[in-house]
Amino acid sequence: MNRMQYKQILTDAIQGEIHSQKFYQDAAGRMQDRFLKELFTRFTHEEKKHMKREHKLKMEQAFVDIGYPEVW
């Protein structure tokens, strides 16, 4: 796998996390049942945690790309 493919995979993963977070947040807002509302709210929080990790990975990769262009 080359660096461009790696970057695309990270970008796709981050977009998936954003989409999932919005889906769960919207679902939580529509739920009348307290248990389901709490469940989807928890899913939303989990997706936010994933985003933080994905964002961190992307920032680390950007650092490598800027700091070590010869790797390209």
Image (cartoon, helix red, strand yellow):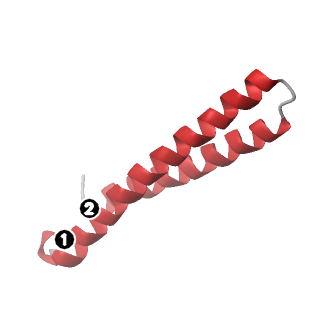
Give 47 or 37, whichever is nearer the viewer. 37
- In this image, 38 relative to 7: left or right? right
The image quarter in which residue 69 lies: bottom left
Q: Circle 1 sits in a helix, a strand or a loop, which is it?
A: loop
The image quarter in which residue 30 lies: top right
Q: Residue furthest right?
A: 32
- In this image, 44 relative to 33: left or right? left
- Residue 6 in picture, x, y percent from top left: 31, 55
- Residue 11 in picture, x, y percent from top left: 45, 58
Q: Residue furthest left?
A: 70
- Residue 29 in picture, x, y percent from top left: 81, 41
The image quarter in which residue 26 lies: top right
| Residue beneath the point at 26% across and 61% down | 3
Residue type highlighted by circle 1: Trp
Q: Which residue is mark 1?
A: 72
Residue 23 higher or lower than 57, as above or below: above
- Residue 5 in picture, x, y percent from top left: 33, 57
Q: Which residue is mark 2?
A: 3
Quadrant position of the C terminus in the picture: bottom left
Residue type highlighted by circle 2: Arg
| Residue beneath the point at 54% across and 54% down | 15
Give 10 or 25, whichever is nearer the viewer. 25
Residue 23 higher or lower than 72, as above or below: above
| Residue beneath the point at 23% across and 77% down | 66
